[in-house]
Image (tube, rainbow, N blue to C red):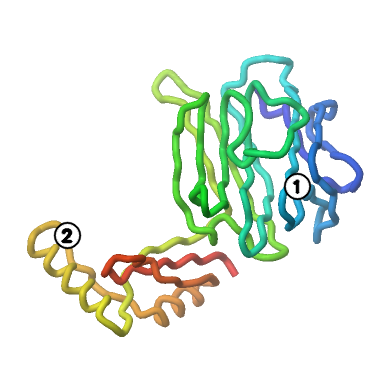
Amino acid sequence: MTRQQQVFDRFNDLATVDNQGTVPAAVQTLSGNCVFQTGPVDGFLQLTAQANSEFGTLVIDDFNGNSAVGGFTASMKAQLVGGNPADGWSFSWGNGITPVQVYGGLESGLGNDLRVGFITCAGSGRSIRVNWRGAALANVAVPIELLQTPADTFEEVLIRVTPATSTSDALLDVAQDGVLVIRSGLDTPGWRFRFTRWNDRMANRLRWMQALPVHYPTAESLTTTLTAAGLTGTLQPLHGHTPFNNWLAVFRRA
């Protein structure tokens, strides 16, 4: 597939897809609860509202003349809001995808080839999952803060397949809008911090840890530093049922 073969939708006519790419005849089929909406810059396709038992799909037919495809780039602006979203959304590419879909399991992807699922259901394990021809390539657990977007915000999602060469294997990249994620021990009141610091020192003496932490930031100092860099986000405990004073920081560009 060459760079000239492209499907590009802005959803501005609010009635149907408005492909402005180089293959305008590419057939695109909607099913489920899809609704066209007006956005701050361009229109957008709302796959589902914030309601139970809804689904929506957009299927683009083969627009490469049934020729083999070595690599491609799929780029989209995505929004996922709601206090407890379920079950997620997915991107799929390849054979075995029928134009019209029905409710159930769509967050895991469709078809016989590439499936990338952004799973938001807590019961299924919130994660980004990648499958290729039935084999699991990746299943990365992520907090809901990484999968959701701030209200009225669309974030870039990039899925890129780089074809194999004579010296390297094919490469798949999956990226969601730039988010800074830090797992760190914090200097907080209480026994957890004292135990964590003692454990680090023991691990260093036993040579499990090559170097001791230079500094344990406080929640306030870490937030101040990140805010000064133009970021906004949250800090939350990550120790669970362990005695270690681990915290998770998730920050985005303000």
Q: Residue 53 at x, y = what percent?
A: 72, 49
Q: Residue 174 at x, y = what percent?
A: 53, 42
Q: Give the SS element for disc 1.
A: loop
For marks 2 and 1 on the same chain, the one whose residue lies earlier in the sequence: 1
Task: Name the one closer to the observer, 235 or 71.
Answer: 235
Residue 64 lies in what quarter of the image?
top right
Question: Closer to the camera: disc 2 or disc 1?
Answer: 1
Residues at marks 2 and 1 touching, judged by CB atoms closer than 8 Å: no
Q: Give the SS element for disc 2.
A: loop
Q: Is residue 113 left or right of residue 59?
A: left
Task: Name the one closer to the observer, 75 or 247.
Answer: 247
The amino acid at mark 1 is: Leu
Mark number for residue 209? 2
Q: Is residue 233 left or right of residue 40?
A: left
Within 10 angstroms of label 1, few (less than 14), some, or many (20 or more) residues? some
Q: Is residue 207 left or right of residue 170?
A: left
For residue 146, above or below residue 241: above
Residue at the image position 85 percent from the left and 49 percent from the top: 36
Within 10 angstroms of label 2, few (less than 14), some, or many (20 or more) residues? few
Task: Name the one closer to the observer, 189 or 243.
Answer: 243
**Which residue in the structure is indicated by mark 1?**
47
Residue 4 lies in what quarter of the image?
top right
Residue at the image position 69 percent from the left and 50 percent from the top: 77
Q: Is residue 249 left or right of residue 120?
A: left
For residue 122, above or below residue 30: below
For residue 231, above or below residue 70: below
Q: Residue 232 at x, y = what percent?
A: 55, 72
C-alpha span from label 2 to label 1: 48 Å
The amino acid at mark 2 is: Met
Tell me the quadrant of the picture where the N terminus can be found.
Answer: top right
Q: Residue 8 at x, y = what percent?
A: 76, 38
